[in-house]
Image: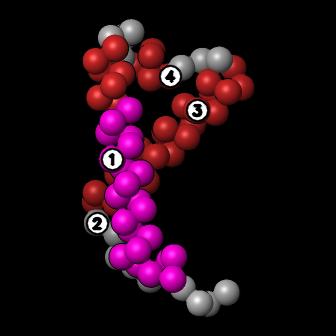
Amino acid sequence: MCKLNIFDKTSFILVLIGAFNWGLIGLLNFNLVNIISLGYPLVQRIIYVVIFLASLNLISLMFRCNIVNSKNY
């Protein structure tokens, strides 16, 4: 079992929010990030970049915890 720090836990939450937003866009054509940012494009870009960085952290977490190279299946 791999120990998660606060950045890893925050990354999970941010990526889940991002996935939820994409689901809302696909199903209902409703962009939650647009609502949160009040339509400011710079704020939207910052939110998307933060979610992107969180996803990169989760990819590195997979390698740190040997999830990718695990032979337990």
Distance between mark 2 and mark 1 Cα atoms = 16 Å
In this rendering, the answer to whether 61 lies above or below 14 is below
Residue under label 4, please give it.
Answer: 32
The answer for how far apart the CA atoms under marks 2 and 4 are is: 27 Å
The answer to whether residue 62 of the structure is visible from this angle is: yes
Estimate how packed mark 4 is, as few (under 14), some (14 to 19) or many (20 or more) residues with alpha carbons within 10 Å: some
**Is residue 71 shown in magenta?**
no
Query: Which dot marks residue 22?
Result: 3
Would residue 2 be found to the left or right of residue 23 on screen?
left
Q: Nearer the viewer, mark 2 or mark 1?
A: 1
- Residue bearing the label numbered 2: 5
Neighbourhood count class around disc 1 (C-alpha, 10 Å): few under 14, some 14–19, many 20 upward: some
First in sequence: mark 2 vs mark 4: 2
Q: Amino acid at mark 1?
A: Leu
Q: Residue furthest right?
A: 27
Q: Quadrant of the N terminus?
A: bottom left
Residues at badges 2 and 1 in contact (C-beta under 8 Å)?
no
Calculate the distance from the C-alpha at mark 2 to the C-alpha at mark 3. 26 Å
Between discs 2 and 1, the one toward the N terminus:
2
What segment is highlighted magenta in the picture? Answer: 48-69
Quarter of the view holding residue 24: top right
Amino acid on which disc 4 is placed: Leu
Between discs 2 and 3, the one toward the N terminus: 2
Residue 45 locus on image (x, y percent): 33, 25
Residue at 41% over, 51% down: 55
The local secondary structure at tag 3 comes to helix
Q: State yes or no: discs 2 and 3 in contact (Cβ < 8 Å).
A: no
Whole-number angstrom distance, CA of label 4 to CA of label 3 = 9 Å
Q: Amino acid at mark 2?
A: Asn
> Up-down: is 20 above or below 53?
above
Question: Which residue is tagged 1?
Answer: 53
- Look at the numbered disc 2 and give the secondary structure of its residue: loop
